[in-house]
Amino acid sequence: MKRWLTWLLLAALLSIYGCTNQAGETVTTTNPPPQNTRNMRQLNLTVSKDDGMMRIERPSLGDRIPMGEQDTWTVFVYLCGSNLESNWSCASNDMYEILDGAYSNNVRFVVETGGSNIWHFVEDNTIPADRNQRFVIQNGGVYRMWDGEHAPMGDSRTLASFLKWGVENYASEHMAVILWDHGGGSVSGVCYDEYENEHHGNYDLLSLTELDAALLSVFQDMTDKFEFIGFDACLMSTIETANIIASYADYMIASPESEPGDGWDYTALANVLAASPDSRAYEVGRQICDSYYASYANGNSQAMATLSLLDLSNVDKFLTYFNDFAKELYESAQDIGRMSYISRAIQNIDNFGGNSPNEGYTNMVDIGLMIDACSPYVNNSSLARQSLDDLVAYKVMGSDHSSTSGLSVFYPLKIGSSEYMDKAAGISISPWYLSFTDIQNNGAIYTDVAYAYYNHSLDNGETWNPGTGEEIDTWNSSQDNSYNETDGYYQSQEPNQVYTYTDDDIHWGNSPFITFDEYPQANAEGEYYCRLDEMGKTFVADIKAKCYELNHEEKDFIELGETCQIYGSWEDGYFKDGFDGTWISLPDGQNLAIYVVERRPDGVAYSSPIRLNGERKFLRLNWYYDGHIEAIGIWDGVDETGTASRIQPLPQQGEEIVPIYYAHNAITKEESTYRGTPYIVEGNLEIISSYLEAGEYWYNFYITDIFGDWLETEQVNLITDGKGSRPIWAYG
C-alpha cells in the first residue's frame, strides 16, 4: 500500500546507527574497527601445463571483524530503473514494498536511484531522471541523503562510489547488496542504464569484470564480507558470476532464468529482517526465495520462476572439480563421434532466457544438467555434481524448470561477435572448458575444416595453447583490475582480442554437415520422411518441421511456425513426420506463428511474435503432451546488448493482440512480415489447439547441426480436410 511521506532533505536519521552533519551526510556514531592483516590480491584462477590442476587466489580479510552494532542489518539496493521503471513503475513499486514492511530500528535499506528516463515514485518530490540520488528507508520513512549529477549505472565507478559511501556511513553487523534491473547472464552482465544525455550513451551495462572492480574498490575498506549479494535481475545465477561474488560475500541469491516483472517481494524481506535482525544470510536467503516463488502463485508466470541461494564457501571446491571434469570432457571431444553426442546432449538440456533465432540468444545452459548429460563421456563426473549440490544451498523452481540445478554456465549455442566471445573468454572458469567451447566456435566458422580442430590437444610441444590462440605455460583468468590512486577505485581492463576469427564472413543456413542417404520425400504410406547418411547422423543435432500457407498472388510462403511432431532414430538416421493437422490458435481461431524455445520432459515451450496494443512482443506458451496449452506471459526477447526482458503479465480484458507472421517470397527469397486480424481479449486469455482449416499448406524439415548451423529442405505440398485426418502429401 502506498503511503504519503515527507521527504527530509537535511534531516537526521535518528537511530542506533548515527546522525547527520551540517552537509546532510550521515556519519556513524561508532568508531570503525581497526584494519586487520589482509591480502588484497585480486581474484586469480591459474592452471599450469605441468599438472593441469586449478589454483585459486582471492582477496582475503584475515580475521573478520563486524563493522556495526550487533543484530543490525543494512541492505544496499542499487536500483537501476531502466525501462522497467519508465514503462511499468517496477522500481518505484519495490520502494513502496519496502515501506510497507515491518518497522525496526535495527534494519534499514540504503538505495541509489538512476538509469531510467522516467521515475514514478512521487510523494512531495519526484525522483529526477537526470540525477542520481541516495535514500535511506527505515521505519516507514524515506530520507534523501545525497543528490548528484547523473552517473551511468552501468559504470563500475558509480557502483563503487555508492557502496564506499554506504559502508562508510551506514555500516551494520550484517550488510547485503542487491543489484536491481535487467540481467543478461555471464557475458552481458547486469544493470543497463537507459538514460542518455550529451555526456553518457544509454544501455551501458555492468560487465562481470566491472562488477568485480567495483566490489574490490569497497572491499579494501571493509573488515567483513557482505552477508549476501543478490541479483533482482534475470539470468544472473551463473557460475561465472558466483566465481566473482565469492570473494566478497558469504552467499549469492539470483535466478538462472528470466524473472517475472515484479521481481522479489521486498515487503517480505523487510518483515523477515525486522522480526529477526539476528538472522544470517542462509535463513534470510531461504525466505527471499520462498516469498519470491509464493508471490507468483496466482499467475501463470510461476511456471518460469526460479531462484537460487548459493553457499559461496563451496565455490572453490566446485571450480576445482569442474576443471577436472572439463579436462576429461575436452579430451573426449577429440573424438568427433563423441563430440557429436556431447554437443547434441547439451543443446537439448534446460537453457535460460531465450536461445532461439526468433527471440535471440543468451547462451546460458544449466550446468548441473550439462554435467549429467556429459557424464557417459567423463569417467568421474560425480565429484563435480556433488560439489555443485553443496554450492546450491537452496532453490525454488517453477514447473518449466523442475529439473534445474539452480546454476547456469556460458555455452555458445549461437556464436557471437569477436567482442562477445572475448568477454566470454575473459570470465572463463577453466582453460579446458574454454577450449571445449572453442570446438563449437571453430566448427561454426570453419565448416569445411571442422575436423582440423580435433587433431591437436592443449599440450602443444613445449608451450600450451588453451583455446585462446596464445602460447603460454600457465593459463590465467585473473580479473586484471588496475588501481586508480586519484579516486581510490579499481577499474576493469578491456579483454584481450582473441576471437577475431568470429567476425569472418559466415554463411548460415546451408550446413555442409547435414547430408542424406534419402532426401526428404513422401512415401507410399503417406509419410514424409528422410534418412541421414553417416555424416548427417554424426553432425545433426535436431530435426523440427515448419508449416506454411501460400499467398498465391504474392508468391509468399507465410510461416505458421515450427512443430516438434517428428519421430525417428539416431541409430539408423530415419526420421518421419508425425503431423496431425492441429495448430495453436487464438480463441477466435487465428493460427499463431509458433517457434520452439525448448523441448521439456512434459512438452514444448513455444514463443509467438505478436503486437500487443501496438507494441512488438512475444507470447510465451507451453504445449503439453497431454494436449493442453498454457499461456505463460509476455516477453520482449533478448535485446542488442544481450539483456533478457523480464516476463510481463498476460494480456488483460480489452487489450489488443495482433498475430505476426514471417514470410519469404518463393521467387525472390525476399523476407517480409504479415499481420493477422486484431483480437480483443475477453476475460482470461485462453490459447487453444484446433485443426487447420481444410485446404492446401506447405511443409518442410528444419534441421540444425551441432555447431548451430541449419538447413531448411524444400517445401512440399500437403492437404488437410479440417477434421483431423492425416494430411495428404500431394507430392514430395
Image (cartoon, grey):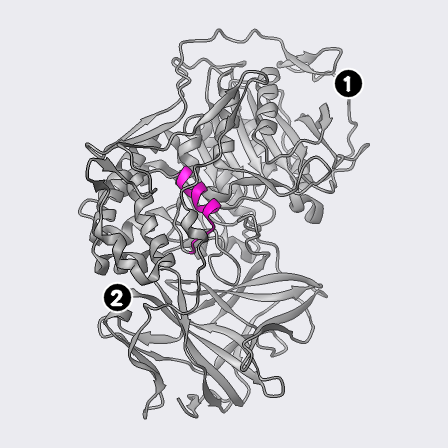
**Residue appearing at x 49%, y 53% in the figure:** 353
First of labels 1, 2 by sequence position: 1
Residue 155, image x, y percentages: 59, 32
Choose between 660 and 438: the one closer to the eye.
Answer: 438
Crowding at mark 2 (Cα within 10 Å: few <14, some 14-19, many 20+)? many
Relative image position of residue 275 (x, y in whole percent): 55, 27
Q: Is residue 705 left or right of residue 156?
A: left
Q: Secondary structure at mark 2?
A: helix
Please name whichever residue, 467 or 150, is drawn nearer the observer in this view of the structure.
Answer: 467
Residue tagged by mark 1?
A: 10
In the picture, the disc for residue 538 is 2
Residue type highlighted by circle 2: Thr
Marks 1/2: CA–CA distance: 70 Å
Q: Quadrant of the N terminus?
A: top right
Q: Which tag is nearer the camera, tag 1 or tag 2? A: 2
Q: Nearer the viewer, residue 642 or 86?
A: 642
Return the x and y of residue 385 as percentages of the image width and height.
Answer: 28, 43
Q: Which residues are magenta?
A: 414-427
Choose top left, top right, bottom left or bottom right for residue 394: top left
Q: Is residue 51 above or below residue 645?
A: above
Kind of residue indicated by mark 1:
Leu
